[in-house]
Amino acid sequence: MAGVSALRAEQPAANPADQFLAEALVTNPGIESTRLEWAAMAEMPEVVASLPDPMVSYGYYFTSVQTRVGAMRQRFGISQKIPFPGKLGTAKARSAADAQVAFWKFRGAMRDVFAQGRTLLADLYRADEAIVILRDQEALLRKSAASAKALVETNQGSLANIIRADVAAEEISTRIAQIDAERTGIVARMAALRGIAEPDAAIARYTQPELPPLPSLVELMKWSIEANQELKAAQAAISRDELAVRAAALEYYPDVTFGFDYTILDSSTVMPDTPDNGSDPIMGTVAVNVPIWWDKLGAQKRSATARLGSSQARRAQLAADVSANVQAAYAMARTMREQRDRYIREILPQARQAWESTISGYGSGTVSLTDLLDVQRAYLTAEIGRIDRTAGYLRAFAELERAVGVPLSSNLSKNLKLSN
């Protein structure tokens, strides 16, 4: 079983994104809660495998009972229950399987926090990169508005051009303010993921995320079967319930209780000329419970068998769900990557070339401000499209990692000890 060190970063993270993820895995209260639940369950096998506490009894005869060897005054007894062979071992193995279920829930909590962190980083990238692009465009529009004002002052331009440029610049300024407000919410959720309730310190602009390569679907399906935490927990639950069926079957067999009693006699009441006069008697005892309530025992076994069937059915459904989730996330990630590559390879260069040509033409007076604004909007749409598809790929990749159960980036796998 993996140790608590699985929470820790194996070595310092290589970049701020990795540092954020590593810190979240260490400080997230939800992860700590599931870890402690697992730690508590891990102690239980030794508890259930122990013999029941011995029983010590004491009796006092308020009215002496006369016997041939003397009057009985006090009685001491001790007994120990010995369960039928196999009961304690089965209980220990069942409790260990229960601890395994708790362990995989703990690992699942780590996986979910990791995926949430990756998704928040994708959202942060989208906001920060969009703000950079929009601010550049706003600055250019402000310059265009200033140029239009200069032309009006020399009677070479129109007031309408100034209004168009100012309105376009204000629209971009409004979008920047909206995205900046969204960024504040993203930063707050990043702080919450690390267990920080107060406003977090400013986070540097995140505009150069790692774009991990997309493995093949065949590899992903194989890894998900081997690594997905829900499947691991479901398999551990099956093992636990199989042992519960065995434990129910063992209830048909009796337990044995061994003991002895020691009786203290009143020596002043000893009858004369009686063998063993005054000797305190010692008696050994053996008690066996008789499991005769077959209806109860049968119901226990049927209940355990039904619970085992439920766990097996749940494992089968989870396997189908995991397969579907991996396929869906893979399809989305592949689509987003293809669309992003297409934008970078074809659409964005054309839009940028048209924009640069229009800027040059506007400066030389061969292109109108209206045409400039139209091309500027098209170029801005292309840039935002690239950002959206990059962020979409990162989000889909995070969902793919959550469905598989392990980080798929070699860099993250190296820096963060998250392997199962």
Image: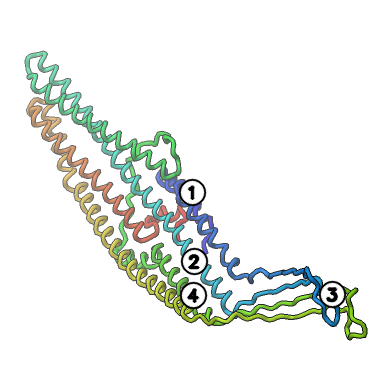
Q: Amino acid at mark 2?
A: Asp
Q: Which residue is mark 1?
A: 26
Q: Amino acid at mark 1?
A: Val
| Residue 187 spot, x, y in % from top left | 37, 39
Q: Which residue is mark 3?
A: 265
Q: Using the image as rendered, state which of residue 125 and residue 215 is in the foreground.
A: 125
For the point 57% across and 82% down, the residue is 290
| Residue 258 spot, x, y in % from top left | 69, 78
Q: Cα distance, mark 4 to mark 3?
A: 50 Å
Say whether disc 1 or disc 3 marks the residue closer to the N-terminus. Answer: 1
Q: Quadrant of residue 15?
A: top left
Q: Cα distance, mark 3 to mark 2?
A: 52 Å
Q: Cα distance, mark 4 to mark 2?
A: 10 Å
Q: Cα distance, mark 2 to mark 1?
A: 24 Å
Q: Which residue is mark 2?
A: 98
Give the crowd class for mark 3: few <14, some 14-19, many >=20 residues within 10 Å: many
For the point 32% across and 37% down, the residue is 183
| Residue 24 spot, x, y in % from top left | 44, 47
- The answer to whether residue 296 is above or below residue 320 is below
The residue mark sitting in front, 2 or 1, is 2
Q: Cα distance, mark 1 to mark 4?
A: 34 Å
Asked if the residue at tag 3 contacts the one at tag 1, i.e. Cβ–Cβ closer than 8 Å, the answer is no
Q: Amino acid at mark 4?
A: Leu
Q: Secondary structure at mark 4?
A: helix
The residue mark sitting in front, 3 or 2, is 3
Q: Secondary structure at mark 2?
A: helix
